[in-house]
Amino acid sequence: MVLPKNPNVFANSPLNRAGHLRADQDWLKSALADKQSLFIPVWKLMPFLIKNREGKRETGWVTGELALPLMRPGAIVIFLGLYRDSAHFAIDISSHTDPTNEGALAGLGTFADLRTIAEEIDIGDAAILAQAKSLIDWHQRHGFCANCGEPTIAADAGYKRFCEACNTEHFPRTDPVVIMLALNGDTCLLGRQEKWPAGFYSALAGFIEPGETIEEAVARELHEEAGITIDQVSFHSTQPWPYPSSLMIGCYARAKTTDITVDMNELSDARWFTREEVRNALDKGSKDLRMPPSLAIAHQLVKSWVEET
């Protein structure tokens, strides 16, 4: 099945995740030793980067010859998936003091925060690195069993942790977040927080609560944060967001009311902006209205609305 291209950064992974292979220990052992397998070293949640012939940074995939010597006892190794029959792994090397100056990677590249380089590297690699970051982050946070408190061990090629003391299985979680642009005629609702740069506004957002639908979460968040009542919700797109592991669900909402009552615990301001004001901010820039960067799904929501005929 071929899906339409997702407009958001961290989407469009080219990998076949091959979940059926995660518990196959013989296959995993063979893949780790295969010279065709590729590894991405991750240090303190930052991926390894190298420079190409044009001097631009790209993902620092390395072979097992370089990667496997970096493994230390207890290091997390995650099978990310297959691409053209080549197995791709992520390896957590956070226990190293400075792998850019010592060991097998010394002098070969650097490490950088994924958010700062996501739009610079290949779009497929950005999606793969988001997968790797989320999983390694989860392992670092869940070393102990939530049921009995005993240490857990990694299993299923990095997609499970298991408690041998009480036989409890723990799986990575993804937190769903609604992010929405409320619309009223030729205007949209944007809000800001006090800590943001002057003039910076974005779409409103919030976590979906247990037992709540996407539509109900959109309506609740808009009413709680801005006092706006809506009567219709439509879907735009989703974005994996590895900070630490959320799924941003982008929506539009049709407003029934326009009077704004700002929840000052959540926002410092919220306003209705015209399509022309938003278009000018996107195209030319404005000191009075600054838009989210293209990395953010909020940017794609606003851009799609502005470009409507």
Image (tube, rainbow, N blue to C red):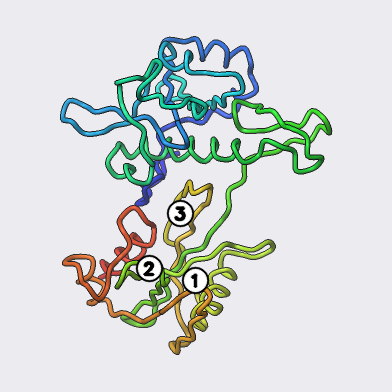
C-alpha span from label 3 to label 2:
16 Å
Residue shown at 68% from the left, 33% from the top: 161
From the image, which quarter does the C terminus lie in?
bottom left
Question: Observer-nearest residue: 223 or 17?
Answer: 223
Kindly state the secondary structure of the residue where label 1 is placed: strand
- Evaluate whether residue 23 shows in this view: yes
Quarter of the picture containing the N terminus is top left
What residue appears at the point 62 percent right and 12 percent down from the top-left corner? 26
229 relative position to 163: left or right: left
Circle 3 is placed at which residue position?
238
Pointer 3 local density, CA inside 10 Å: few below 14, some 14–19, many at least 20 = many
Q: Quadrant of residue 14?
A: top left
Q: Which residue is mark 2?
A: 202
Question: Mark 1 is on which residue type?
Answer: Val
- Kindly identify the amino acid type of the residue bearing the numbered disc 2: Ser
Q: Earlier in the sequence, mark 3 or mark 2?
A: 2
* Residue 230 at least partly seen: no
The residue labelled by disc 1 is 233
Q: Image check: 49 left or right of 3?
A: left
